Amino acid sequence: MPSSKKVEFAGAQGDTLAAKLELPSGKPRAYALFAHCFSCSKDIHAASRIARRLARHGIAVLRFDFTGLGQSEGDFANTNFSSNVDDLVNAAAHLADEYEAPSLLIGHSLGGAAVIAAASRIDSTKALVTIGAPADADHVALQFEDSVAEIEARGEATVSLAGRPFKIKKQFLDDISGRSLEDAAADLKKPFLICHAPLDETVGIDNATRLFVAAKHPKSFISLDDADHLLTREADSAFVADIVSAWAARYAAPDPLPAPPKPVKDGVVAQETRLGKFQNWVVNQDFATLADEPASVGGDDSGMTPYGHVAAGLATCTSMTIRMYADHKKLKLDRVTVAVRHNKSHVEDCESCEAGKPVKIDVFEKDIRLEGDLSADERAKLLEIAGRCPVHRTLHEEVKIRSRLVE
């Protein structure tokens, strides 16, 4: 299973920045760097959900709090767009020193503008992605436009952003003034994916148009339909992550898995991928999945265990058998859920056991949930039918396994 690791590194102003590294099971396809939106943190829903889902796709992602935000040290009032870009460069250097240099840069909102500006300074960059990014850095000033005059006159002002107070100094305004990202986008010379919602009320879709027109090929645009700027719906974040994973496979995060083996007639074939100690392709008909062992025994946690596959066969066969019977009898069964747990238990009374020596036998425990308007008798009958599923019966009968070597 993917895991999350706390990380710290020095920011551009010497402060300790807090970060999280989302790691996939096994060797990552690539490392990515994620820059969050203005005044947000690494733990905003969009950043955390996209990073974790990318880890499930095999891409390691570092997300961090810029100086003065979230759990990072420093004074936000002394930061600006340029210092955010410098923080990104430092984050990339930390990944390169401790893990692997990032090949993919991802930025949300002003973080998207920051990755465009930082890309030329991060040599390992192979591709970059923006999500709801502005074409001008000074677009962010619209979030506190009522206070701009005060900042210009007094040199600073406390503004409210997402319900929280932040001190903005004039140097921040000076730094973002006139900072168009179109020239930087034109100079990227890297594959560029722009994700933007047409109805984004914070950063208008015209910003995506400007960046897309400015950028050189290969460039791509993905519409986020009715998503809001912060991607508050989990489904929108999942969509972005899935698209980024598929797109990055061509440019920055190739899938290291070899092609699965060809299926065998009326059977299942397992073949080592050679990417981990135990990882195997498992192919049945036209369907392929991975099998592996937990990290605790030297595996990569990249797929179900062998006993997991056995338990899955028992669970699915039980569910299908119940469904077939219920449909045949026209019972009001809405849904079947079968949970199977496997363990080995000591047996005190065993006719075939050596005298005085307790043995362990395999035990599969099935928890069956039946949803629907069913009587007690109907439920009892369906429980009886559950024991008649072919896999259940196979596990109860004597089984012979014949092994032979083939060329």
Image (tube, grey):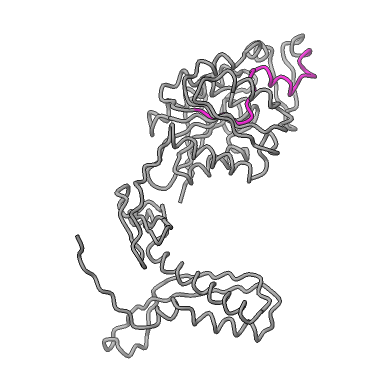
Say which quadrant the C terminus sits in.
Answer: bottom left
- The vertical placement of 322 against 307, above or below, is below
Question: Quadrant of residue 233 in the image?
Answer: top right
| Residue furthest top in the image | 153
Q: Position of residue 145 (x, y in %)?
A: 77, 19
Residues 106 and 346: in front is 106
Question: Quadrant of residue 327 in the image?
Answer: bottom right
Could you tell me which residue is drawn at 71 percent across and 76 percent down?
A: 373
Could you tell me which residue is drawn at 35 percent across and 78 percent down?
A: 360
Is 6 on the left-hand or right-hand side of 201? left
- The vertical placement of 316 against 39, above or below, is below
Residues 302 and 166: in front is 302
Q: Position of residue 311 (x, y in %)?
A: 44, 69
Is 103 on the left-hand or right-hand side of 229? left
Stretch of the chain drawn in magenta: 128-150
Q: Does residue 133 show up magenta in the picture?
A: yes
Q: Position of residue 262 (x, y in %)?
A: 34, 56
| Residue furthest right in the image | 146
| Magenta residues, dominant SS class | helix
Is 198 on the left-hand or right-hand side of 281? right
| Residue furthest bottom in the image | 351
Q: Does residue 217 show up magenta in the picture?
A: no
Q: Position of residue 291 (x, y in %)?
A: 38, 57
